[in-house]
């Protein structure tokens, strides 16, 4: 486990430097908005999603210079989704990564606008890259796929379904419907974006797609298990909050032992999808193992 | 004036048909989200911004097939901005175009998500067009410019500055700062998008840019004047609401007669920018005259 943690720490620093360069401190108005965007984006986070873009690009022999703008865009989209999901009208969370959520640290209007701007700037960054790309059509495809993954049929649709499910008795089909969209879609899109921009052929892209699908689900199962088991000091969130909200989670519909079994199976399937890749795919393998981690232990 | 009104009515029907085709009624989840998106996008509106995309493309000899996706994207971005601006944490408006705003007709969480999804789908539509465009690099440029116009340095920044200005004593510099971003940026971007995608050369693009800048300001001056003068039955908004909120408006800093004078000057400048265009630019001229309309009368 040590190797992948060192890898992720190194990549996190690179990603943070690239993100900070996109959003320099500004003294000009609207500085409060820019501060809120920086606060939402730069105050921490494991940067797993952008690391997946870079690792998938590396696995197929792509260059970092080409992949980094998409890595940044993916993290900006992730950050926007957290800011909006935390709002009082949505999950009403006051704590994120152990610190006040954006609407608490600033105000609700600023949080809504900071999320809107982060989403918009993500597409700005990708469009700028596409304009300069020797293969602008391929770059447009990456952008189109990412937009599909995070729009009404993807991530935003998943959050809407999650809110609609509250108070209802969740079943496995509903939980998977929500999680495939709410969490899985962006993780899959991150892996595919890295593969596409790295120049993956169709066969390699299909394998990366299988990996990304399994990883996306594994991620959420593990997160649900962690939330059910771990204290606030570990998650940075109030313990058992999902259960208290009667949220649609895997432990809630499968029970904790079966949820853990499911996490292990998904990890196996994610790793199997990478069988034909060489050691350049090791970071992808390491991220999958780390994502499930203790959540897979009986 | 009759001619331009017939033109806009005909274009409105075409634009509405294209928008409805992007968002068909769905029975599958998350159907409440899709309903809210359709409600926000399809329940009316003059479609001035998408008409500007089409008219600017026509003025430089572009094709409708190429311009329509950008026209739709511009209207989707406009619709998202209205949904979010109307939220309780922002302008807290309950009425829009004479009907309940999205968060009133649905709920706050759904309105936030519907706005997010409309913005995302706008970029999806443009990325899809870029992927199919014989000149994908040019299409990427249009997308990059639009993103710039509506992000933190553009439309969203203008809304943030507008909220920050409430309660302060507005001056002309502040009012222009806000309006150039909040309203002007998207109008200018709509005109430039039509010009670019229609194949405008640099000289024509510069003239369209001048037209778009003047029109964007004229639009807002006229809107401020209308809000100060007209009853709810005309605007679909509560009368004098801007004044009641101490909003930064042109009549507030210039007085009503000078604001009207300013509207007339901006119209003159917008029309002058089109001097070298032939009659294919008549709809652009007509839209400018209509935008100022009675607001320019002493």
Image (cartoon, coloured by chain):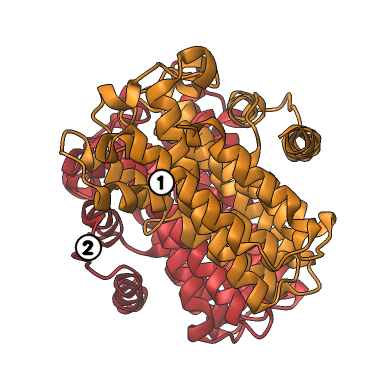
Chain colours: A red, B orange
- The spot of residue B11 in percent (x, y) is 78, 39
For mark 1, what is the residue?
A: B262
- Mark 1 against mark 2, which lies toward the viewer? 1
Subunit under mark 2: A
Give the quarter of the image for residue B170.
top left
Residue B203 visible to the viewer: yes
Q: Residues within 10 Å of mark 1 (few under 14, many from 20)?
A: some
The residue that appears at 84% across and 60% down in the rendered structure is: B63
Residue A247 seen in the figure? no
Q: At 22% across and 42% down in the image, what residue appears?
A: B164
Q: Please state the horizontal and vertical placement of residue B253, each as a whole percent of the image.
A: 25, 40
Give the SS element for disc 2.
Answer: loop
Q: Quadrant of the N terminus of chain A?
A: bottom left
Label placed on residue B18: none
Q: Which mark is residue A28?
A: 2
Rendering coords of residue B202 (x, y %): 64, 78
Residue toward you, B290 or A3: B290
Q: Relative to B68, does residue A4 appear above or below in the rendering?
A: below
């Amino acid at each position: 486990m040590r190797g992948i943690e060192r890898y992720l720490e190194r990549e996190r620093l690179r990603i943070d430097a690239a993100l900070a360069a996109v959003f320099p401190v500004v003294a000009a108005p609207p500085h409060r908005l820019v501060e809120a965007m920086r606060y939402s984006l730069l105050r921490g986070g494991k940067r797993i999603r952008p690391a997946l873009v870079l690792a998938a690009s590396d696995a197929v022999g792509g260059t970092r210079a080409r992949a980094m703008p998409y890595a940044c865009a993916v993290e900006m989209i992730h950050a926007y989704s957290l800011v909006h999901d935390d709002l009082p009208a949505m999950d009403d969370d006051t704590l994120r990564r152990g610190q006040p959520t954006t609407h608490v640290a600033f105000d609700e209007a600023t949080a809504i606008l900071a999320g809107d701007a982060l989403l918009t700037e993500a597409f700005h960054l990708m469009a700028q890259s596409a304009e300069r790309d020797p293969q602008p059509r391929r770059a447009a495809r990456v952008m189109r796929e990412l937009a599909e993954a995070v729009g009404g049929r993807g991530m935003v649709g998943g959050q809407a379904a999650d809110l609609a499910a509250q108070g209802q008795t969740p079943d496995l089909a509903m939980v998977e419907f929500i999680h495939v969209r709410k969490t899985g879609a962006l993780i899959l899109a991150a892996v595919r974006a890295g593969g596409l921009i790295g120049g993956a052929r169709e066969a390699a892209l299909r394998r990366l797609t299988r990996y990304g699908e399994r990883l996306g689900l594994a991620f959420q199962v593990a997160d649900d298990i962690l939330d059910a088991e771990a204290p606030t000091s570990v998650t940075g969130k109030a313990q058992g909050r999902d259960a208290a909200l009667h949220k649609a989670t895997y432990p809630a519909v499968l029970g904790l032992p079966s949820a853990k079994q499911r996490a292990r199976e998904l990890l196996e399937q994610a790793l199997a999808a990478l069988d034909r890749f060489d050691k350049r795919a090791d970071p992808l393998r390491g991220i999958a193992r780390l994502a499930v981690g203790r959540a897979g232990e009986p």
